Image (tube, grey):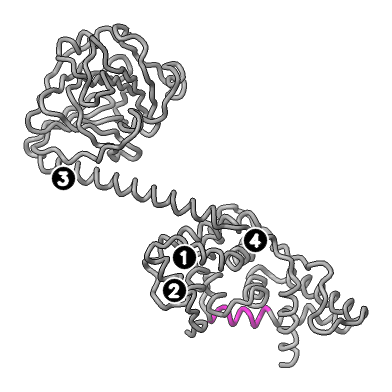
C-alpha cells in the first residue's frame, strides 16, 4: 500500500497534536473539514448528518491520536473514522436518503472561453452524467463519488467506505461500465 | 479503453462543476467536543478510582465487615477507609456535589417527584439542592447559635433525603476504625447513629457505581415513611434525635 507523498506540514501538525497541542489539531481540522464533510455527505446523503458525523469524527480522532502510527498517512486514517461515523448515522436514521448532487450555475469549461454552442454542449454532458450517476445504485455512486468527485485515492476511498481496496477497484470497474451503458443513448442520441 | 478514459475525464470535469452543500466551520464545535470529552473521561476515571478504592476497602474488610442495609442506603464497616476524593472548591452545592440548586423546598420537590420532611425546629433551609443522578434532595442549614458548624464552616446541618427503595440505593456509608454504628429508633423507624472518627460517605451514581466519596462527621440515618433520611451535623446524639423528632 503506497500512501501519498508525506506532507511535512501535516506530519508536524499531527505530531504536535499527538502531544496535546490543540492549536495544531485545529489546523488539521481546518485543513480537512471540507474533505471530511463531503465524504460524510456522500455516505449519509444529508448535510446535517454529514456535519455531525464529521464533527464527531474529528473529536474521536483527537482522542485516538495516541494510537495513530507516526509517519503514516493521516487522511485515510481520518477518513476511516469519518466513514464509520457517517455509516452509524445513516443506520441510526433508518432511512436511505438519496445523495443529492447539483451543478453549479454559470460554470464554464477550463481554458479558453468556449463558443456558446460548445459551452451548452458541455453543460448538457455534465447534466447527463450527473443524471446517470444518481441512477446507479448506492454502492456504485459512493465509490465513483469518492474516487472522482472528491478525488480520493483508492486507499482513501476504501477507508471512507469501510471496504477493502480490492473491492473499491472491482466496484469502480462495474460502476464505470454501468455509467457508460447509461450514457450510450446520450452520445448516440 | 479510450471510452473508459473519456468517461474518467468527464467525471473529473464533473467534479469541478458540482455544487456541494456549504462546508461548515467545525473548529468551534470540535474544540468544545474535545473539552466535553476530556471532562467526561476525567469524571469516568474519578468514578473508576473511587469504585476501585471502595471495592478494595470492602474486599479487604470482608471477613470482619458488618453490612447494614436500610431501605435506600447501605452502611458497611471496614478495617481501613479508602482515601476521599479531592475536595472541590466553590459554593456549598459545588463543594459537596449536591446537584442543582432550587429556590425553595417546593421547587426541589417538584423536580425530585417526591415530598420531603423538614425539621420544624430549624424551619425552612437556607439552601435546597436536588442531585438527579442519585435522586437525593438536600436541605442545607447554615451554622447558628443552636446549630454549630460542622467540619465545613458554612454548614450547620445537611439533611439529605431520598426515596427509600429496596432495589435502588441513593447513598452509602463506609465506617472505618474509630467509627461507631449504634442502632436507634427515630420516629418509629429503624435507624443508626454513626459517630466517632469521620466515616466515608458516597452517592450511588447510575449503574450502582459510587461517586463523590468524602469524609463525613456524625450522622443520624433512618427510614421514615417512604424515605431514607440522614442528618449530618455537629450535634450530639440526643440533640440529633431531638432534631429528627421534629421532622414533618
The image's mark for residue B56 is 3
The chain containing the residue under callout 3 comes to B
Marks 4 and 2 close (CB-CB < 8 Å): no
Residue at the image point whose x is 36% and y is 50% from the top:
B41
Q: Is residue A65 left or right of residue B16?
A: left
Q: Residues within 10 Å of mark 1 (few under 14, many from 20)?
A: some
Q: In the rendered structure, which segment of residues is drawn in magenta? A: A166-175
> Whole-Å distance between the Cαs marked 1 and 4?
20 Å
> Whole-Å distance between the Cαs marked 3 and 1?
41 Å
The chain containing the residue under callout 2 comes to A
Number of the front mark, 2 or 3: 2
**Both marks 4 and 3 on one chain:** yes
Q: Point out residue A53 in the picture as x, y percentages from the top left corner.
A: 55, 58
The image's mark for residue B23 is 4
Q: Is residue B163 visible from the viewing direction of this image?
A: no
Number of the front mark, 4 or 3: 4
Q: Which residue is mark 1?
A: A24
Where is B41 relative to B11, above or below?
Answer: above
Q: Is residue B29 visible from the viewing direction of this image?
A: yes
Q: Is residue A118 left or right of residue B127?
A: right
> Whole-Å distance between the Cαs marked 4 and 2?
25 Å
Residue B67's image quarter? top left
Q: Residues within 10 Å of mark 4 (few under 14, many from 20)?
A: some
The chain containing the residue under callout 1 comes to A
The number of callouts visible is 4
Amino acid at each position: 500500500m503506497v500512501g501519498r507523498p508525506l506532507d511535512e506540514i501535516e506530519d508536524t501538525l499531527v505530531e504536535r497534536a499527538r502531544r496535546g497541542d490543540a492549536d495544531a489539531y485545529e489546523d488539521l481540522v481546518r485543513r480537512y473539514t471540507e474533505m471530511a464533510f463531503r465524504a460524510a455527505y456522500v455516505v449519509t446523503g444529508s448535510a446535517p448528518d454529514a456535519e455531525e458525523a464529521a464533527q464527531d469524527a474529528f473529536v474521536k480522532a483527537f482522542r485516538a491520536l495516541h494510537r495513530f502510527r507516526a509517519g503514516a498517512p493521516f487522511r485515510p486514517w481520518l477518513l476511516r473514522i469519518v466513514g464509520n461515523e457517517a455509516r452509524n448515522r445513516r443506520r441510526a436514521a433508518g432511512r436511505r436518503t438519496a445523495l443529492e448532487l447539483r451543478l453549479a450555475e454559470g460554470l464554464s469549461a477550463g481554458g479558453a472561453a468556449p463558443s456558446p454552442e460548445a459551452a451548452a454542449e458541455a453543460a448538457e454532458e455534465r447534466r447527463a452524467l450527473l443524471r446517470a450517476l444518481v441512477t446507479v445504485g448506492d454502492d456504485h455512486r459512493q465509490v465513483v463519488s469518492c474516487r472522482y468527485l472528491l478525488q480520493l485515492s483508492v486507499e482513501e476511498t476504501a477507508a471512507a467506505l469501510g471496504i477493502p481496496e480490492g473491492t473499491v477497484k472491482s466496484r469502480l470497474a462495474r460502476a464505470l461500465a454501468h455509467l457508460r451503458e447509461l450514457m450510450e443513448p446520450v452520445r448516440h442520441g | 479503453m479510450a471510452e473508459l478514459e473519456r468517461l474518467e475525464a468527464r467525471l473529473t470535469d464533473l467534479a469541478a462543476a458540482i455544487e456541494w452543500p456549504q462546508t461548515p466551520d467545525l473548529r468551534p464545535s470540535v474544540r468544545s467536543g474535545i473539552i466535553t470529552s476530556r471532562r467526561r473521561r476525567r469524571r469516568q476515571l474519578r468514578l473508576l478510582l473511587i469504585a476501585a478504592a471502595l471495592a478494595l476497602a470492602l474486599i479487604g474488610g470482608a471477613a470482619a465487615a458488618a453490612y447494614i442495609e436500610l431501605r435506600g442506603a447501605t452502611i458497611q464497616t471496614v478495617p481501613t477507609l479508602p482515601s476521599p476524593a479531592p475536595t472541590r472548591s466553590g459554593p456549598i452545592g459545588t463543594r459537596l456535589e449536591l446537584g442543582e440548586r432550587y429556590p425553595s423546598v417546593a421547587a426541589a420537590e417538584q423536580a425530585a417527584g417526591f415530598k420531603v420532611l423538614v425539621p420544624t425546629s430549624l424551619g425552612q433551609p437556607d439552601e435546597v439542592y436536588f442531585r438527579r443522578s442519585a435522586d437525593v434532595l438536600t436541605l442545607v442549614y447554615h451554622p447558628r447559635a443552636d446549630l454549630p458548624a460542622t467540619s465545613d464552616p458554612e454548614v450547620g446541618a445537611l439533611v439529605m433525603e431520598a426515596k427509600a427503595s429496596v432495589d435502588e440505593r441513593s447513598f452509602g456509608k463506609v465506617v472505618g476504625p474509630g467509627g461507631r454504628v449504634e442502632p436507634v429508633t427515630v420516629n418509629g423507624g429503624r435507624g443508626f447513629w454513626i459517630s466517632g472518627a469521620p466515616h466515608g460517605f458516597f452517592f450511588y451514581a447510575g449503574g450502582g457505581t459510587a461517586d463523590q466519596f468524602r469524609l463525613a462527621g456524625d450522622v443520624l440515618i433512618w427510614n421514615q415513611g417512604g424515605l431514607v433520611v440522614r442528618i449530618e451535623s455537629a450535634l450530639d446524639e440526643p440533640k440529633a434525635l431531638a432534631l429528627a423528632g421534629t421532622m414533618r
